[in-house]
Each structure stands twice: as structure tokens, then as C-alpha cells.
Image (cartoon, rainbow, N blue to C red):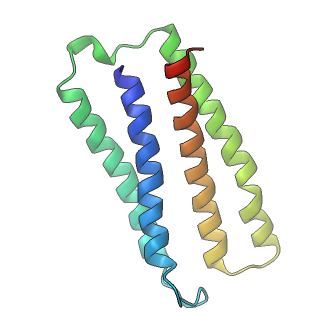
């Protein structure tokens, strides 16, 4: 497994685990969404996700051979495919929070669906990259 494929797996797993923890904390049974304190947990989830990916990236590259970080044409093409999938997923999923904002929905739902759109784009990017590495382009 190449370093880039490992990074795609790690990015995908953190894109699932961190939001799951966020939504488990914020959407506890019996919680009123009009009064839920979601701003701090949302910011912490965003920061924690980014920092976790950086730390794991550093840790995985420490034991790797010196030339493991090099990319070839295939890696660049897979990276472009993943970025395209991320862009399209975010573009389509961002329609929901936009519609909620136009409908004057509570801020909680707008922020949560926007965060979910971001998460869906990360999952789409990771999935496309992993499949491309496994099956080839």
C-alpha cells in the first residue's frame, strides 16, 4: 500500500469518526435544537479533524522510506479524481444549507448541514482515491 493510499484511508476514516462524535454529542435524545450549544463542538470538531489528519500524516511518513512521498503521474491523476469528486459532492450537497438559509431555518440546521456537506465531500474524495488505487485508473 502506497503512502498516498494510506493517507486516503486515514482521511476517510477521520472524516467519518470525528463527525460521528460531534453529532453524538450535539444530537443527544431529548435535546431541543433551538437551545443546543453547537458552535463550540462544531469548531472543535473542525479543528480536531484537521489536526488529527496532520498528526497522522506526520506519523505515517516518519517510518516510510525517503522516496515514499514521491508521486508519479498515476498518483497525480488519482489526486485530481479525488479532488473532482470532492468538488462535485460539496457543490451538490451545499444546496441543502443554502435552501435552509433561504427558508430561514434555525442556524443549527444550516450549520449542521453545511458541516455534513463538507464531510460528504471528504468521504467522496477518500472513496474515489481508495477505489482508484485498488482497481486502477
Residue 119 in the image: x percent, y percent?
55, 52
Answer left or right for 10 relative to 85.
left
Q: Is residue 79 above or below residue 58?
A: above
Question: Which residue is pictured at 36% across the width and 19% down the height?
Answer: 2
Quarter holding the C terminus?
A: top right
Answer left or right for 26 relative to 92.
left
Question: Which residue is pictured at 76% across the width and 71% down the height?
Answer: 100
- The answer to whether residue 46 is visible is no
Residue 123 in the image: x percent, y percent?
55, 44
> Which residue, as the protein is rendered here, is positioned at the far top?
73
Residue 133 in the image: x percent, y percent?
50, 20
Classify residue 54 by image quadrant. Answer: top left
Q: Is residue 114 above or below residue 100?
A: above
Q: Is residue 9 above or below residue 35?
A: above
Q: Is residue 96 above or below residue 62?
A: below
Answer left or right for 120 relative to 18.
right
In depth, the one of 9 and 121 nearer the eye is 9
- The answer to whether residue 86 is visible is yes
Amino acid at each position: 500500500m502506497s503512502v498516498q493510499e494510506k493517507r486516503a484511508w486515514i482521511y476517510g476514516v477521520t472524516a467519518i469518526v470525528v463527525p460521528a462524535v460531534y453529532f453524538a454529542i450535539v444530537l443527544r435524545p431529548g435535546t431541543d435544537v433551538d437551545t443546543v450549544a453547537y458552535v463550540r463542538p462544531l469548531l472543535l470538531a473542525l479543528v480536531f479533524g484537521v489536526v488529527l489528519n496532520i498528526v497522522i500524516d506526520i506519523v505515517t511518513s516518519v517510518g516510510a522510506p525517503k522516496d515514499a512521498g514521491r508521486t508519479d503521474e498515476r498518483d497525480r491523476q488519482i489526486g485530481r479524481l479525488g479532488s473532482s469528486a470532492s468538488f462535485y459532492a460539496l457543490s451538490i450537497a451545499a444546496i441543502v444549507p443554502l435552501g435552509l438559509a433561504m427558508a430561514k431555518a434555525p442556524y443549527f440546521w444550516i450549520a449542521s448541514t453545511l458541516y455534513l456537506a463538507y464531510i460528504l465531500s471528504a468521504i467522496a474524495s477518500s472513496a474515489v482515491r481508495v477505489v482508484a488505487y485498488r482497481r486502477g485508473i
